Image (spheres, grey):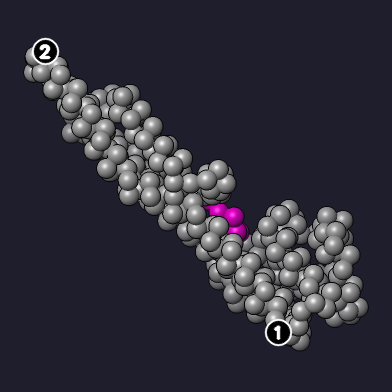
Amino acid sequence: MLLIIGYILVIVGCIGGFTMAGGHVSSLFVASEFVTLGGITLGLLVISSSMAGLKNLVGSLVVALKGGSVAKPDVEELLKLMYELFNTARRNGLIALEDHVLDPNKSAIFSKYKTLAGNHDRLDFLCNGLKPLIDGRIKPDQLESLMMVSLNAKEEEAAEPIHMLQLIGDSLPGIGIIAAVLGIIHTMAIVDQGAGMVGKSVAGALTGTLMGVLGAYGFVNPTAARITANNSLENQYYLGLMKGLCGFAQGMAPLMAVEVSRRCLDHHLTPSADQLEEILKTVGK
């Protein structure tokens, strides 16, 4: 929602200042300039990315428009889920988690925590961390290295839309100049039609430069910054999950392992240590 509000403020600021100076809004909407800008920008995206990259970009934009993928309920459910899993493993051994991990969709534990169980990537990350530990294929002190490989791969994948948007943001002012030059070429072809037509054509051409610069600095670059911030929170979420799981695997008590996880997460989204203890008292009841 904040992203949409920001877009509106940029548009209002631009058009408001223009109309206050006596400009007519209709003169800013030159179809040919928009077609040139849009067509070249889409072509640039297609050339520079794969189909998977384009889908990833669309997904990141949808998440950014919704406000982000990590909220307080996500963090609270993560901490509660880990606490319940760790307590189950402490009482009955790691083997007690096998059925939950092998078929998480039917797990009585996972089904309580929809923000994780309903997110395939998060669920997969947790289960892939638990499976080799339960099977005994890895020592507890080796688990963090294994999970860090997955975390690094997720970071690289999440950074792809940002690189694409940065490319567009860097290119848009130049694309705007291309649109303007095409407009000037057209102007030179109608110079014999009088000053009025020439002035109107030049004004239309200049809107290409305006839209290119405005699109870059008013929309694309800020959106890339928002996605970067969202990715940072998502990365903290995975890091907290990993640190909590690795701490428990290395012998920490469930509460302390969850506390380690809490400290990895953004403090705006996490409960305090005292609040966490109160929250965890309800787990499993």
Q: Which residue is mark 1?
A: 141
Residue 212 place in picture, x, y as percent:
30, 40
The three-letter amino acid code for the residue at tag 2 is Gln
Dominant SS of magenta comes to loop
| Rendered image quadrant of residue 30 | top left
Query: Which badge, 2 or 1, comes first in the chain's sequence?
Result: 1
Q: Residue at x 74, y 66 (%)?
A: 128
Residue 150 place in picture, x, y as percent:
64, 67
Quarter of the image for the C terminus: give it.
Answer: bottom right
| Rendered image quadrant of residue 248 | bottom right
Q: Which residue is mark 2?
A: 193
Q: Residue at x 44, y 50 (%)?
A: 164
Q: Residue at x 23, y 38 (%)?
A: 177
241 relative position to 50: left or right: right
Density class for disc 1 (Cα within 10 Å; few <14, some 14-19, many ≥20) is few
SS at mark 1 in the image: helix
Instruction: Give the magenta-colored segment's residue range.
Output: 67-71
Residue 19 place in picture, x, y as percent:
23, 31
| 76 is within the stretch colored magenta | no
Which mark, by number, is residue 57? none
The three-letter amino acid code for the residue at tag 1 is Asp
